[in-house]
Amino acid sequence: MPDDFAQTIMEKTPLVDPFGRHISYLRVSVTDRCDFRCVYCMAEQMQFLPKSEVLSLEELDRVCSAFIERGVRKLRITGGEPLVRKDILHLFQRLGRHLASGALDELTLTTNGSQLKTYAVGLYEAGVRRINVSLDTLDDAMFAKITRRGRLAQVLEGLKAAHEAGLSVKINAVALRGINDQAFDEMIRFCGERGFDLTLIETMPLGEIDENRTDRFLPLSLVKADLETRWTLEDIPHRTGGPARYVRVRETGGRLGFITPLTQNFCEGCNRVRLTCTGTLFMCLGQEDKADLRTVLRQSSNNADLHAAIDQAIKRKPKRHDFIIDGATRAPAVARHMSVTGG
């Protein structure tokens, strides 16, 4: 069989893991760098990767396109903070061709919002229609404490620019005991007034940080029970392709999501894999097994080799993660930081 014909057949074969789950969602970190140092995500003094280890924008385009050829329909660009990557809009513009062809259903972004004022219009023009913005509080002092170096006003300006550009916004807030556990009422009102969705997330044990996560872990079952004493939360079937489970807040009409990696495992329907900015493919956020796609990319211009490496990786996708918050140890469940794997 000719090589080009064999490659064509492979490219059209959907990616299915050992448990019959179709892999249709790829999250891609384009940088491990960030202009914030959020307390649950990074240590204050971080050492970032040398540029030689980071995939070029052309390499990122190539590997994303290979996944799209195999049935990935949703692509999320993450970081670190993706919008601090030089010339990042060029990558969005390149990937937008897959939206135009119909090969890709959705191109989305997770951001801290700091650069949205600059990039919102360009993102919309590239084909992005929906973004997630990480925002854990609307209090200036608390925001500065959580992010260590962020400015809330800058993020709020970015949200305004995103809304005006036509982007649908979902706010992601990590629930932190003793820090922002009293902030959620205000955030529900804020999002309801602007038509933003809001999703609350349990802190995940990824990477060494400067404090013990056990002290900050806040089960969302407790948060939801507390919110229900003041808000009417109605179950709805809404899904976005991710792990969030949504309710509607009757008083605002807005949607409120809960992501519970520790208290309520959601792995049975996992349809996603994650690519780091170094070309390392993680088949599960909560496992250390990985596949090196950068070497394949740089050693061969033949996409058949890349597809073969992707196939071998998907065959090793585990059934579930092993996240746990262990009060007996400060060690994270997974050593790498969230900024390395991508949000």
Image (cartoon, rainbow, N blue to C red):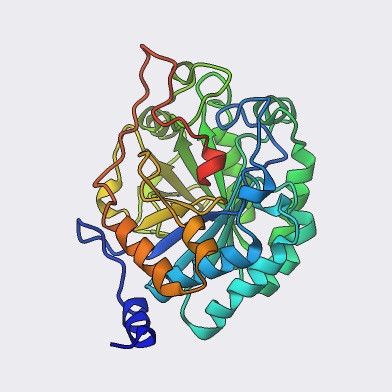
Residue at point 31% right, 67% down? 15
Q: How many marks?
A: 0
Query: x and y percent of residue 132 in the render?
Result: 57, 53
Q: From this viewpoint, is residue 165 visible?
A: no
Q: Indicate the quadrant containing the N terminus: top left, top right, bottom left or bottom right.
A: bottom left
Query: x and y percent of residue 206 in the render?
Result: 46, 32
Query: x and y percent of residue 98 in the render?
Result: 53, 78
Direction left: furthest residue: 19
Q: Nearer the viewer, residue 75 or 70?
A: 70
Q: Nearer the viewer, residue 254 or 72?
A: 72
Residue at point 79% right, 44% down? 154
Image-quadrant location for residue 80: top right
Please tell me whether residue 96 is drawn above or below residue 261 in the rendered image: below
Query: x and y percent of residue 312 in the render?
Result: 30, 59
Q: Nearer the viewer, residue 136 or 212?
A: 212
Image-quadrant location for residue 70: bottom left
Please tell me whether residue 67 is drawn above or below residue 335 in the rendered image: below
Residue at point 29% right, 40% down? 265
Residue at point 66% right, 73% down? 93
Please tell me whether residue 21 is drawn above or below residue 260 in the rendered image: below
Q: Nearer the viewer, residue 116 or 184?
A: 116
Q: From this viewpoint, is residue 156 visible?
A: yes
